[in-house]
Amino acid sequence: MQSVTRRVGWITVLLMMGMAVQGESPYAAWENGPPTDPDFFPIGVWLQDPGLAPRYQEAGMNMYVGLWQGPTEEQLDALAEAGMYVICHQNETALDHPRNDVIIAWLQQDEPDNAQRAEDGGWGPPVPPEEIVRRYETMRERDPTRPVHLNLGQGVAWDGWIGRGERTNHPEDYPEYIKGCDIVSFDIYPVASPREEVQGQLWRVAHGVERLMEWSAPEQPVWSFVEASGIHTGNVASPAEIRSQVWMALVHGAAGILYFVHEWEPAFNASALLDNEETLEGVTAVNHQLRELAPVLNSPTVEGRLTVTADPEDTPLAAMLKEHDGDAYILAVVMRDAPVTAAFTLDGVTGGEVEVEETGETLSIEGGRFEEALEGYETRLYRVPGGAR
């Protein structure tokens, strides 16, 4: 999938192309890959205790990504009992006991694009892209029935990230890294970030997804990590900020959402999300909505029917159009922390009403157009009954 961008002043309307074969799951190529059911949308959590799987399922998640010092048989048994999928490293345990009921993909080394620990305790260069490709080829030789997942660091969305060491300001590395995987994701955490160049810039999530869409092949799904804890700073994204980051990722082409829930400040907690009632409630609400919307999200994005404008024009607004079961769905998000009046024109619809998911209100359509005042970073899911043609 490649993103197609149309600009109206500073307003960006993103209309992503559908799959090469319309309606076909991007995971159909792998016998033991992620489910191809249109009701399945990947929602994962990073490196958690399998014993907590039932609690994460209650929060709307359907897969683990990574297993601490694993996978072990005990870990896989626990996930199987809970009905939770996993993406894990390809160790001998996993290869000897492939567990087609649990393992849906293999995991590359996390963030190989960042500087790596040197033997003397300092920092060396990142893992070269060609090494990641070599590992990928070996993993595929050992098991071609599952895709390989690669997660990259914040350099995807921030060229100046010093954590890349000698490869800082070298974005040209990323298309080469992506050759070493079938599914690619990245992480940047703008609320929890201690860096003033990133802190508070929620739009960095969208920027990273957009770049991965540009750098990846059409058949490679792009996923995005989202922050759900205070990590090293103790700054926890609000439920509204988490929802905004999820919506930004989706509108820009992400086909899966993953959560980072570890926290080191004020004290280490590997599952901090589960101990923060407000954050957990917000994440759960978003995830259950994503699961309900899975058939919509998994449908091809419609091009050419949606026009978006905003006042003022210098505040970016992003939106995409989906069609499912005769209805039209518009996902929209304000891309900066500034209010706008958003206007949407849907070709082929002259009148009627729009249902606003977040508020339960309805808006009138006149001449195919409706509008609404939105706050900074606010999200919208609009449903137009009978709006598909």
Image (cartoon, rainbow, N blue to C red):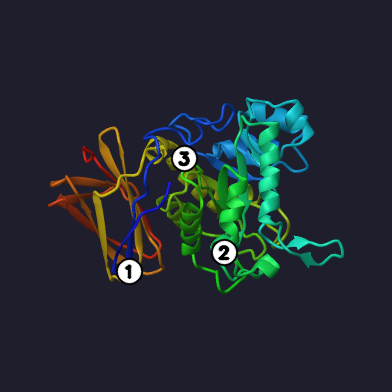
Point out residue 279 in the picture as x, y percentages from the top left corner: 54, 52
> Which residue is tagged 1?
10
Q: Is residue 171 left or right of residue 219?
A: right
The CA span between labels 3 and 2 is 35 Å
In this view, the residue in front, 281 or 101, is 101
The CA span between labels 1 and 2 is 24 Å
Query: Against 75, is 45 above or below?
Result: below
| Residue lying furthest right | 120
Q: Amino acid at mark 1?
A: Trp
First-in-chain label (1 vs 3): 1
First-in-chain label (3 vs 2): 2
Q: Which mark is residue 301?
A: none
Q: Amino acid at mark 2?
A: Pro
Point out residue 242 in the picture as x, y percentages from the top left corner: 50, 55
First-in-chain label (1 vs 2): 1
Q: Residue at x 46, y 56 (%)?
A: 210
Q: At numbered mark 3, what does the secondary structure look like: helix, strand or loop?
A: helix
Query: Against 171, is 38 above or below?
Result: above
Report if residue 305 is visible in the image.
yes
> Which residue is tagged 3?
288
Answer with the quarter of the image where residue 163 lies: bottom right
Is disc 3 surrounded by few (<14), some (14 to 19) or many (20+) residues within 10 Å?
some
Answer with the quarter of the image where residue 189 lies: bottom right
In this view, the residue in front, 211 or 293, is 211
The CA span between labels 1 and 3 is 33 Å
In this view, the residue in front, 42 or 284, is 42
Q: Amino acid at mark 3?
A: His
> Which residue is tagged 2?
171
